[in-house]
Image (cartoon, rainbow, N blue to C red):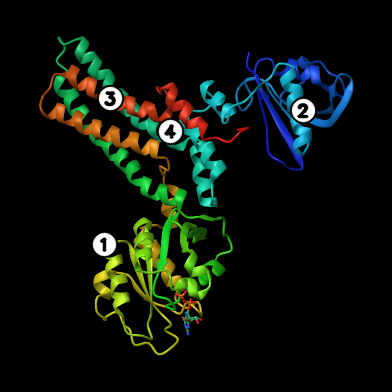
């Protein structure tokens, strides 16, 4: 017997979810619908109005939704009690449920049940976490696609191709008197090439996936008065979809999430950029170096009305070999700096002229970012992207096993050895969708969920 229940946080209404074989019998003990009806007569997907009752006393007026197995989130009998919000009320109803035989749910318990009961695979379950934590529309969209099972389908396709050949191999092993060896060999070679190509494409998509999930971590560096805060303000003003502002991983930094042309960008805003001017002076080259190290993209901004100083040269050193964009700022004034100045071109392939104060050149900046990361919206919209490191690692492992298998074929190993190697690939793929996965991993995945999901 498993009744799992959970309530959501404070809000206008509080929701307590119960799932499990006996959830309706518990509900019958505590809920008095205005229009009495036997539980067998209540259809799934209906909502009933009534009161939660304890020892004859009315506790709250509620709406209860009924979901009947197997048509529910968990595939079990489920109900959701919509009570008046507020912690006291929700907690009281929760306690009444517990007293009547329900158990408290773990984080992610409902989604875990949906997975264990086979309604969704592990990939889909994991996408629920991504949806909940999505910081941008784009990320939510990717999560939603995964929930619909498009990645599962892709993995399934690759697996099916391999399985088709595996059948022939098994036949050749079991009936060596038939000479199918040659045919099978070519089949194996073709199948491996195809699987490798598809897997490599998925593996590569992780870079885009990471960007969708985490945003391009971008640092704006430059000497005091170069125009860092003007640039930051220009970007933030252009973009009305600022999602979050939170402490950065480097001390004294704030990270701000913005979406530019649908691409999430995480601006590492050194406290210095935003704070009073005297604070800015404290942000020296050491600090910039520290920030630059963790950035995916560095925007180095220079005051084009002044010649390059030693400090500027140090900044140029810092961005070499990193993805970077150089901004020659304040072009509305008399500029003396040009792309040809010492070290600029060597430090970055992307140099643009701007006036941060007047918002001139912003669009150019965005286009350069898109170019640098080879992102265009069509790409992100239509392709399957891997966003989860667990999936990425398993795909990498599968690719390694494909390579290993290719070797066993090339070195004319007996078919049964080849077969073992192919089974390793299949196992990696099955691990992704959760067909074969250890309990530890399952627990680890669902522990990341929030309560009530
Ligand atoms: P930070 O110290 O690098 O953050 O630089 P600020 O953004 O605070 O800019 C320093 C000064 O330069 C301020 O007075 C800005 O108004 C000015 N400034 C910034 N960008 C431009 C620009 O594109 N044109 C002009 N004329 N002034 C600018």
Name the residue at the bottom extreme.
Answer: 334
Please report contact status of discs 2 and 4: CB closer than 8 Å, yes or no.
no
Pointer 3 or 2: first along the chain: 2
265 on left or right of 397 = right
- Badge count: 4
Q: Position of residue 324 (x, y in %)?
A: 34, 65
Quick check: is the Cβ at mark 4 less than 8 Å away from ligand 1? Answer: no
Q: Position of residue 92 (x, y in %)?
A: 77, 29
Quadrant of the image for the N terminus?
top right
Q: Position of residue 93 (x, y in %)?
A: 77, 27
Residue 93: image tag: 2
Please report contact status of discs 3 and 4: CB closer than 8 Å, yes or no.
no
Which residue carries the number 4 mark?
153
Name the residue at the left extreme.
Answer: 411
Q: Residues within 10 Å of mark 2 (few under 14, many from 20)?
A: many
Pointer 3 or 4: first along the chain: 4
Q: Rounded to the nearest whole Å, what is the CA distance between mark 2 and mark 1?
A: 60 Å
Residue 321: image tag: 1
Closer to the eye: label 3 or 1:
1
Residue 424: image tag: 3
Closer to the eye: label 2 or 4:
2
Is residue 257 something that shows in the picture?
yes
Q: Label 1, secondary structure: give it.
A: loop
Between residues 416 and 289, which one lies in front from this camera angle? 289
Pointer 2 or 1: first along the chain: 2
Q: Rounded to the nearest whole Å, what is the CA distance between mark 3 and mark 1?
A: 38 Å
Q: Rounded to the nearest whole Å, what is the CA distance between mark 3 and mark 4?
A: 20 Å
Q: Rounded to the nearest whole Å, what is the CA distance between mark 3 and mark 2?
A: 50 Å
Is residue 381 something that shows in the picture?
no
Above or below residue 381? Residue 268 is: below
Between residues 327 and 138, which one lies in front from this camera angle? 327
Residue at screen point 69% across, 15% down: 22
């Amino acid at each position: 017997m498993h009744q799992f229940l959970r309530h959501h946080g404070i809000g206008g209404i509080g929701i307590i979810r119960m799932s499990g074989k006996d959830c309706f019998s518990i509900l019958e003990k505590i809920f008095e619908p205005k229009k009495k009806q036997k539980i067998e007569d209540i259809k799934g997907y209906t909502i009933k109005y009534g009161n939660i009752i304890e020892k004859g006393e009315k506790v709250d007026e509620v709406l209860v939704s009924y979901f009947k197995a197997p048509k529910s989130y968990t595939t079990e009998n489920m109900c959701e009690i919509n009570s008046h919000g507020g912690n006291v009320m929700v907690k009281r109803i929760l306690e009444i449920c517990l007293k009547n035989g329900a158990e408290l749910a773990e984080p992610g318990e409902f989604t875990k049940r949906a997975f264990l009961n086979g309604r969704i695979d592990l990939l889909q379950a994991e996408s629920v976490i991504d949806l909940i934590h999505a910081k941008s529309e784009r990320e939510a969209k990717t999560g939603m696609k995964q929930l619909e099972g498009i990645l599962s389908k892709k993995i399934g396709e690759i697996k099916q191709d391999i399985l088709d050949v595996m059948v022939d191999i098994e036949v050749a092993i079991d009936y060596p008197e038939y000479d199918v060896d040659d045919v099978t060999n070519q089949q194996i070679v073709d199948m491996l090439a195809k699987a490798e190509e598809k897997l490599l494409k998925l593996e590569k998509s992780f870079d885009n996936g990471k960007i969708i999930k985490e945003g391009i971590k971008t640092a704006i560096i430059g000497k005091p008065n170069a125009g860092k805060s003007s640039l930051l303000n220009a970007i933030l003003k252009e973009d009305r979809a600022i999602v979050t502002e939170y402490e950065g991983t480097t001390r004294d930094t704030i990270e701000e999430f913005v979406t530019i042309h649908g691409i999430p960008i995480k601006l590492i805003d050194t406290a210095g950029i935003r704070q009073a001017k005297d604070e800015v002076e404290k942000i020296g080259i050491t600090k910039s170096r520290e920030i630059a190290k963790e950035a995916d993209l560095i925007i180095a901004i220079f005051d084009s009305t002044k010649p390059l100083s030693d400090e500027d040269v140090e900044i140029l050193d810092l961005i070499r070999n990193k993805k970077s964009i150089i901004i020659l700022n304040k072009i509305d004034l008399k500029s003396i700096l040009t792309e040809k100045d010492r070290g600029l071109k060597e430090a970055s392939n992307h140099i643009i002229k701007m006036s941060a104060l007047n918002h001139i050149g912003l669009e150019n900046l965005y286009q350069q970012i898109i170019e640098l990361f080879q992102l265009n919206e069509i790409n992100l919209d239509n392709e399957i992207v891997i966003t989860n490191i667990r999936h990425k690692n398993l795909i990498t492992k599968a690719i390694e096993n494909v390579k290993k298998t290719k070797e066993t074929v090339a070195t004319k190993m007996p078919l049964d050895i080849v077969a073992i190697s192919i089974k390793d690939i299949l196992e990696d793929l099955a691990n992704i969708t959760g067909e074969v996965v250890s309990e530890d991993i399952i627990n680890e995945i669902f522990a990341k969920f929030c309560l009530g999901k």
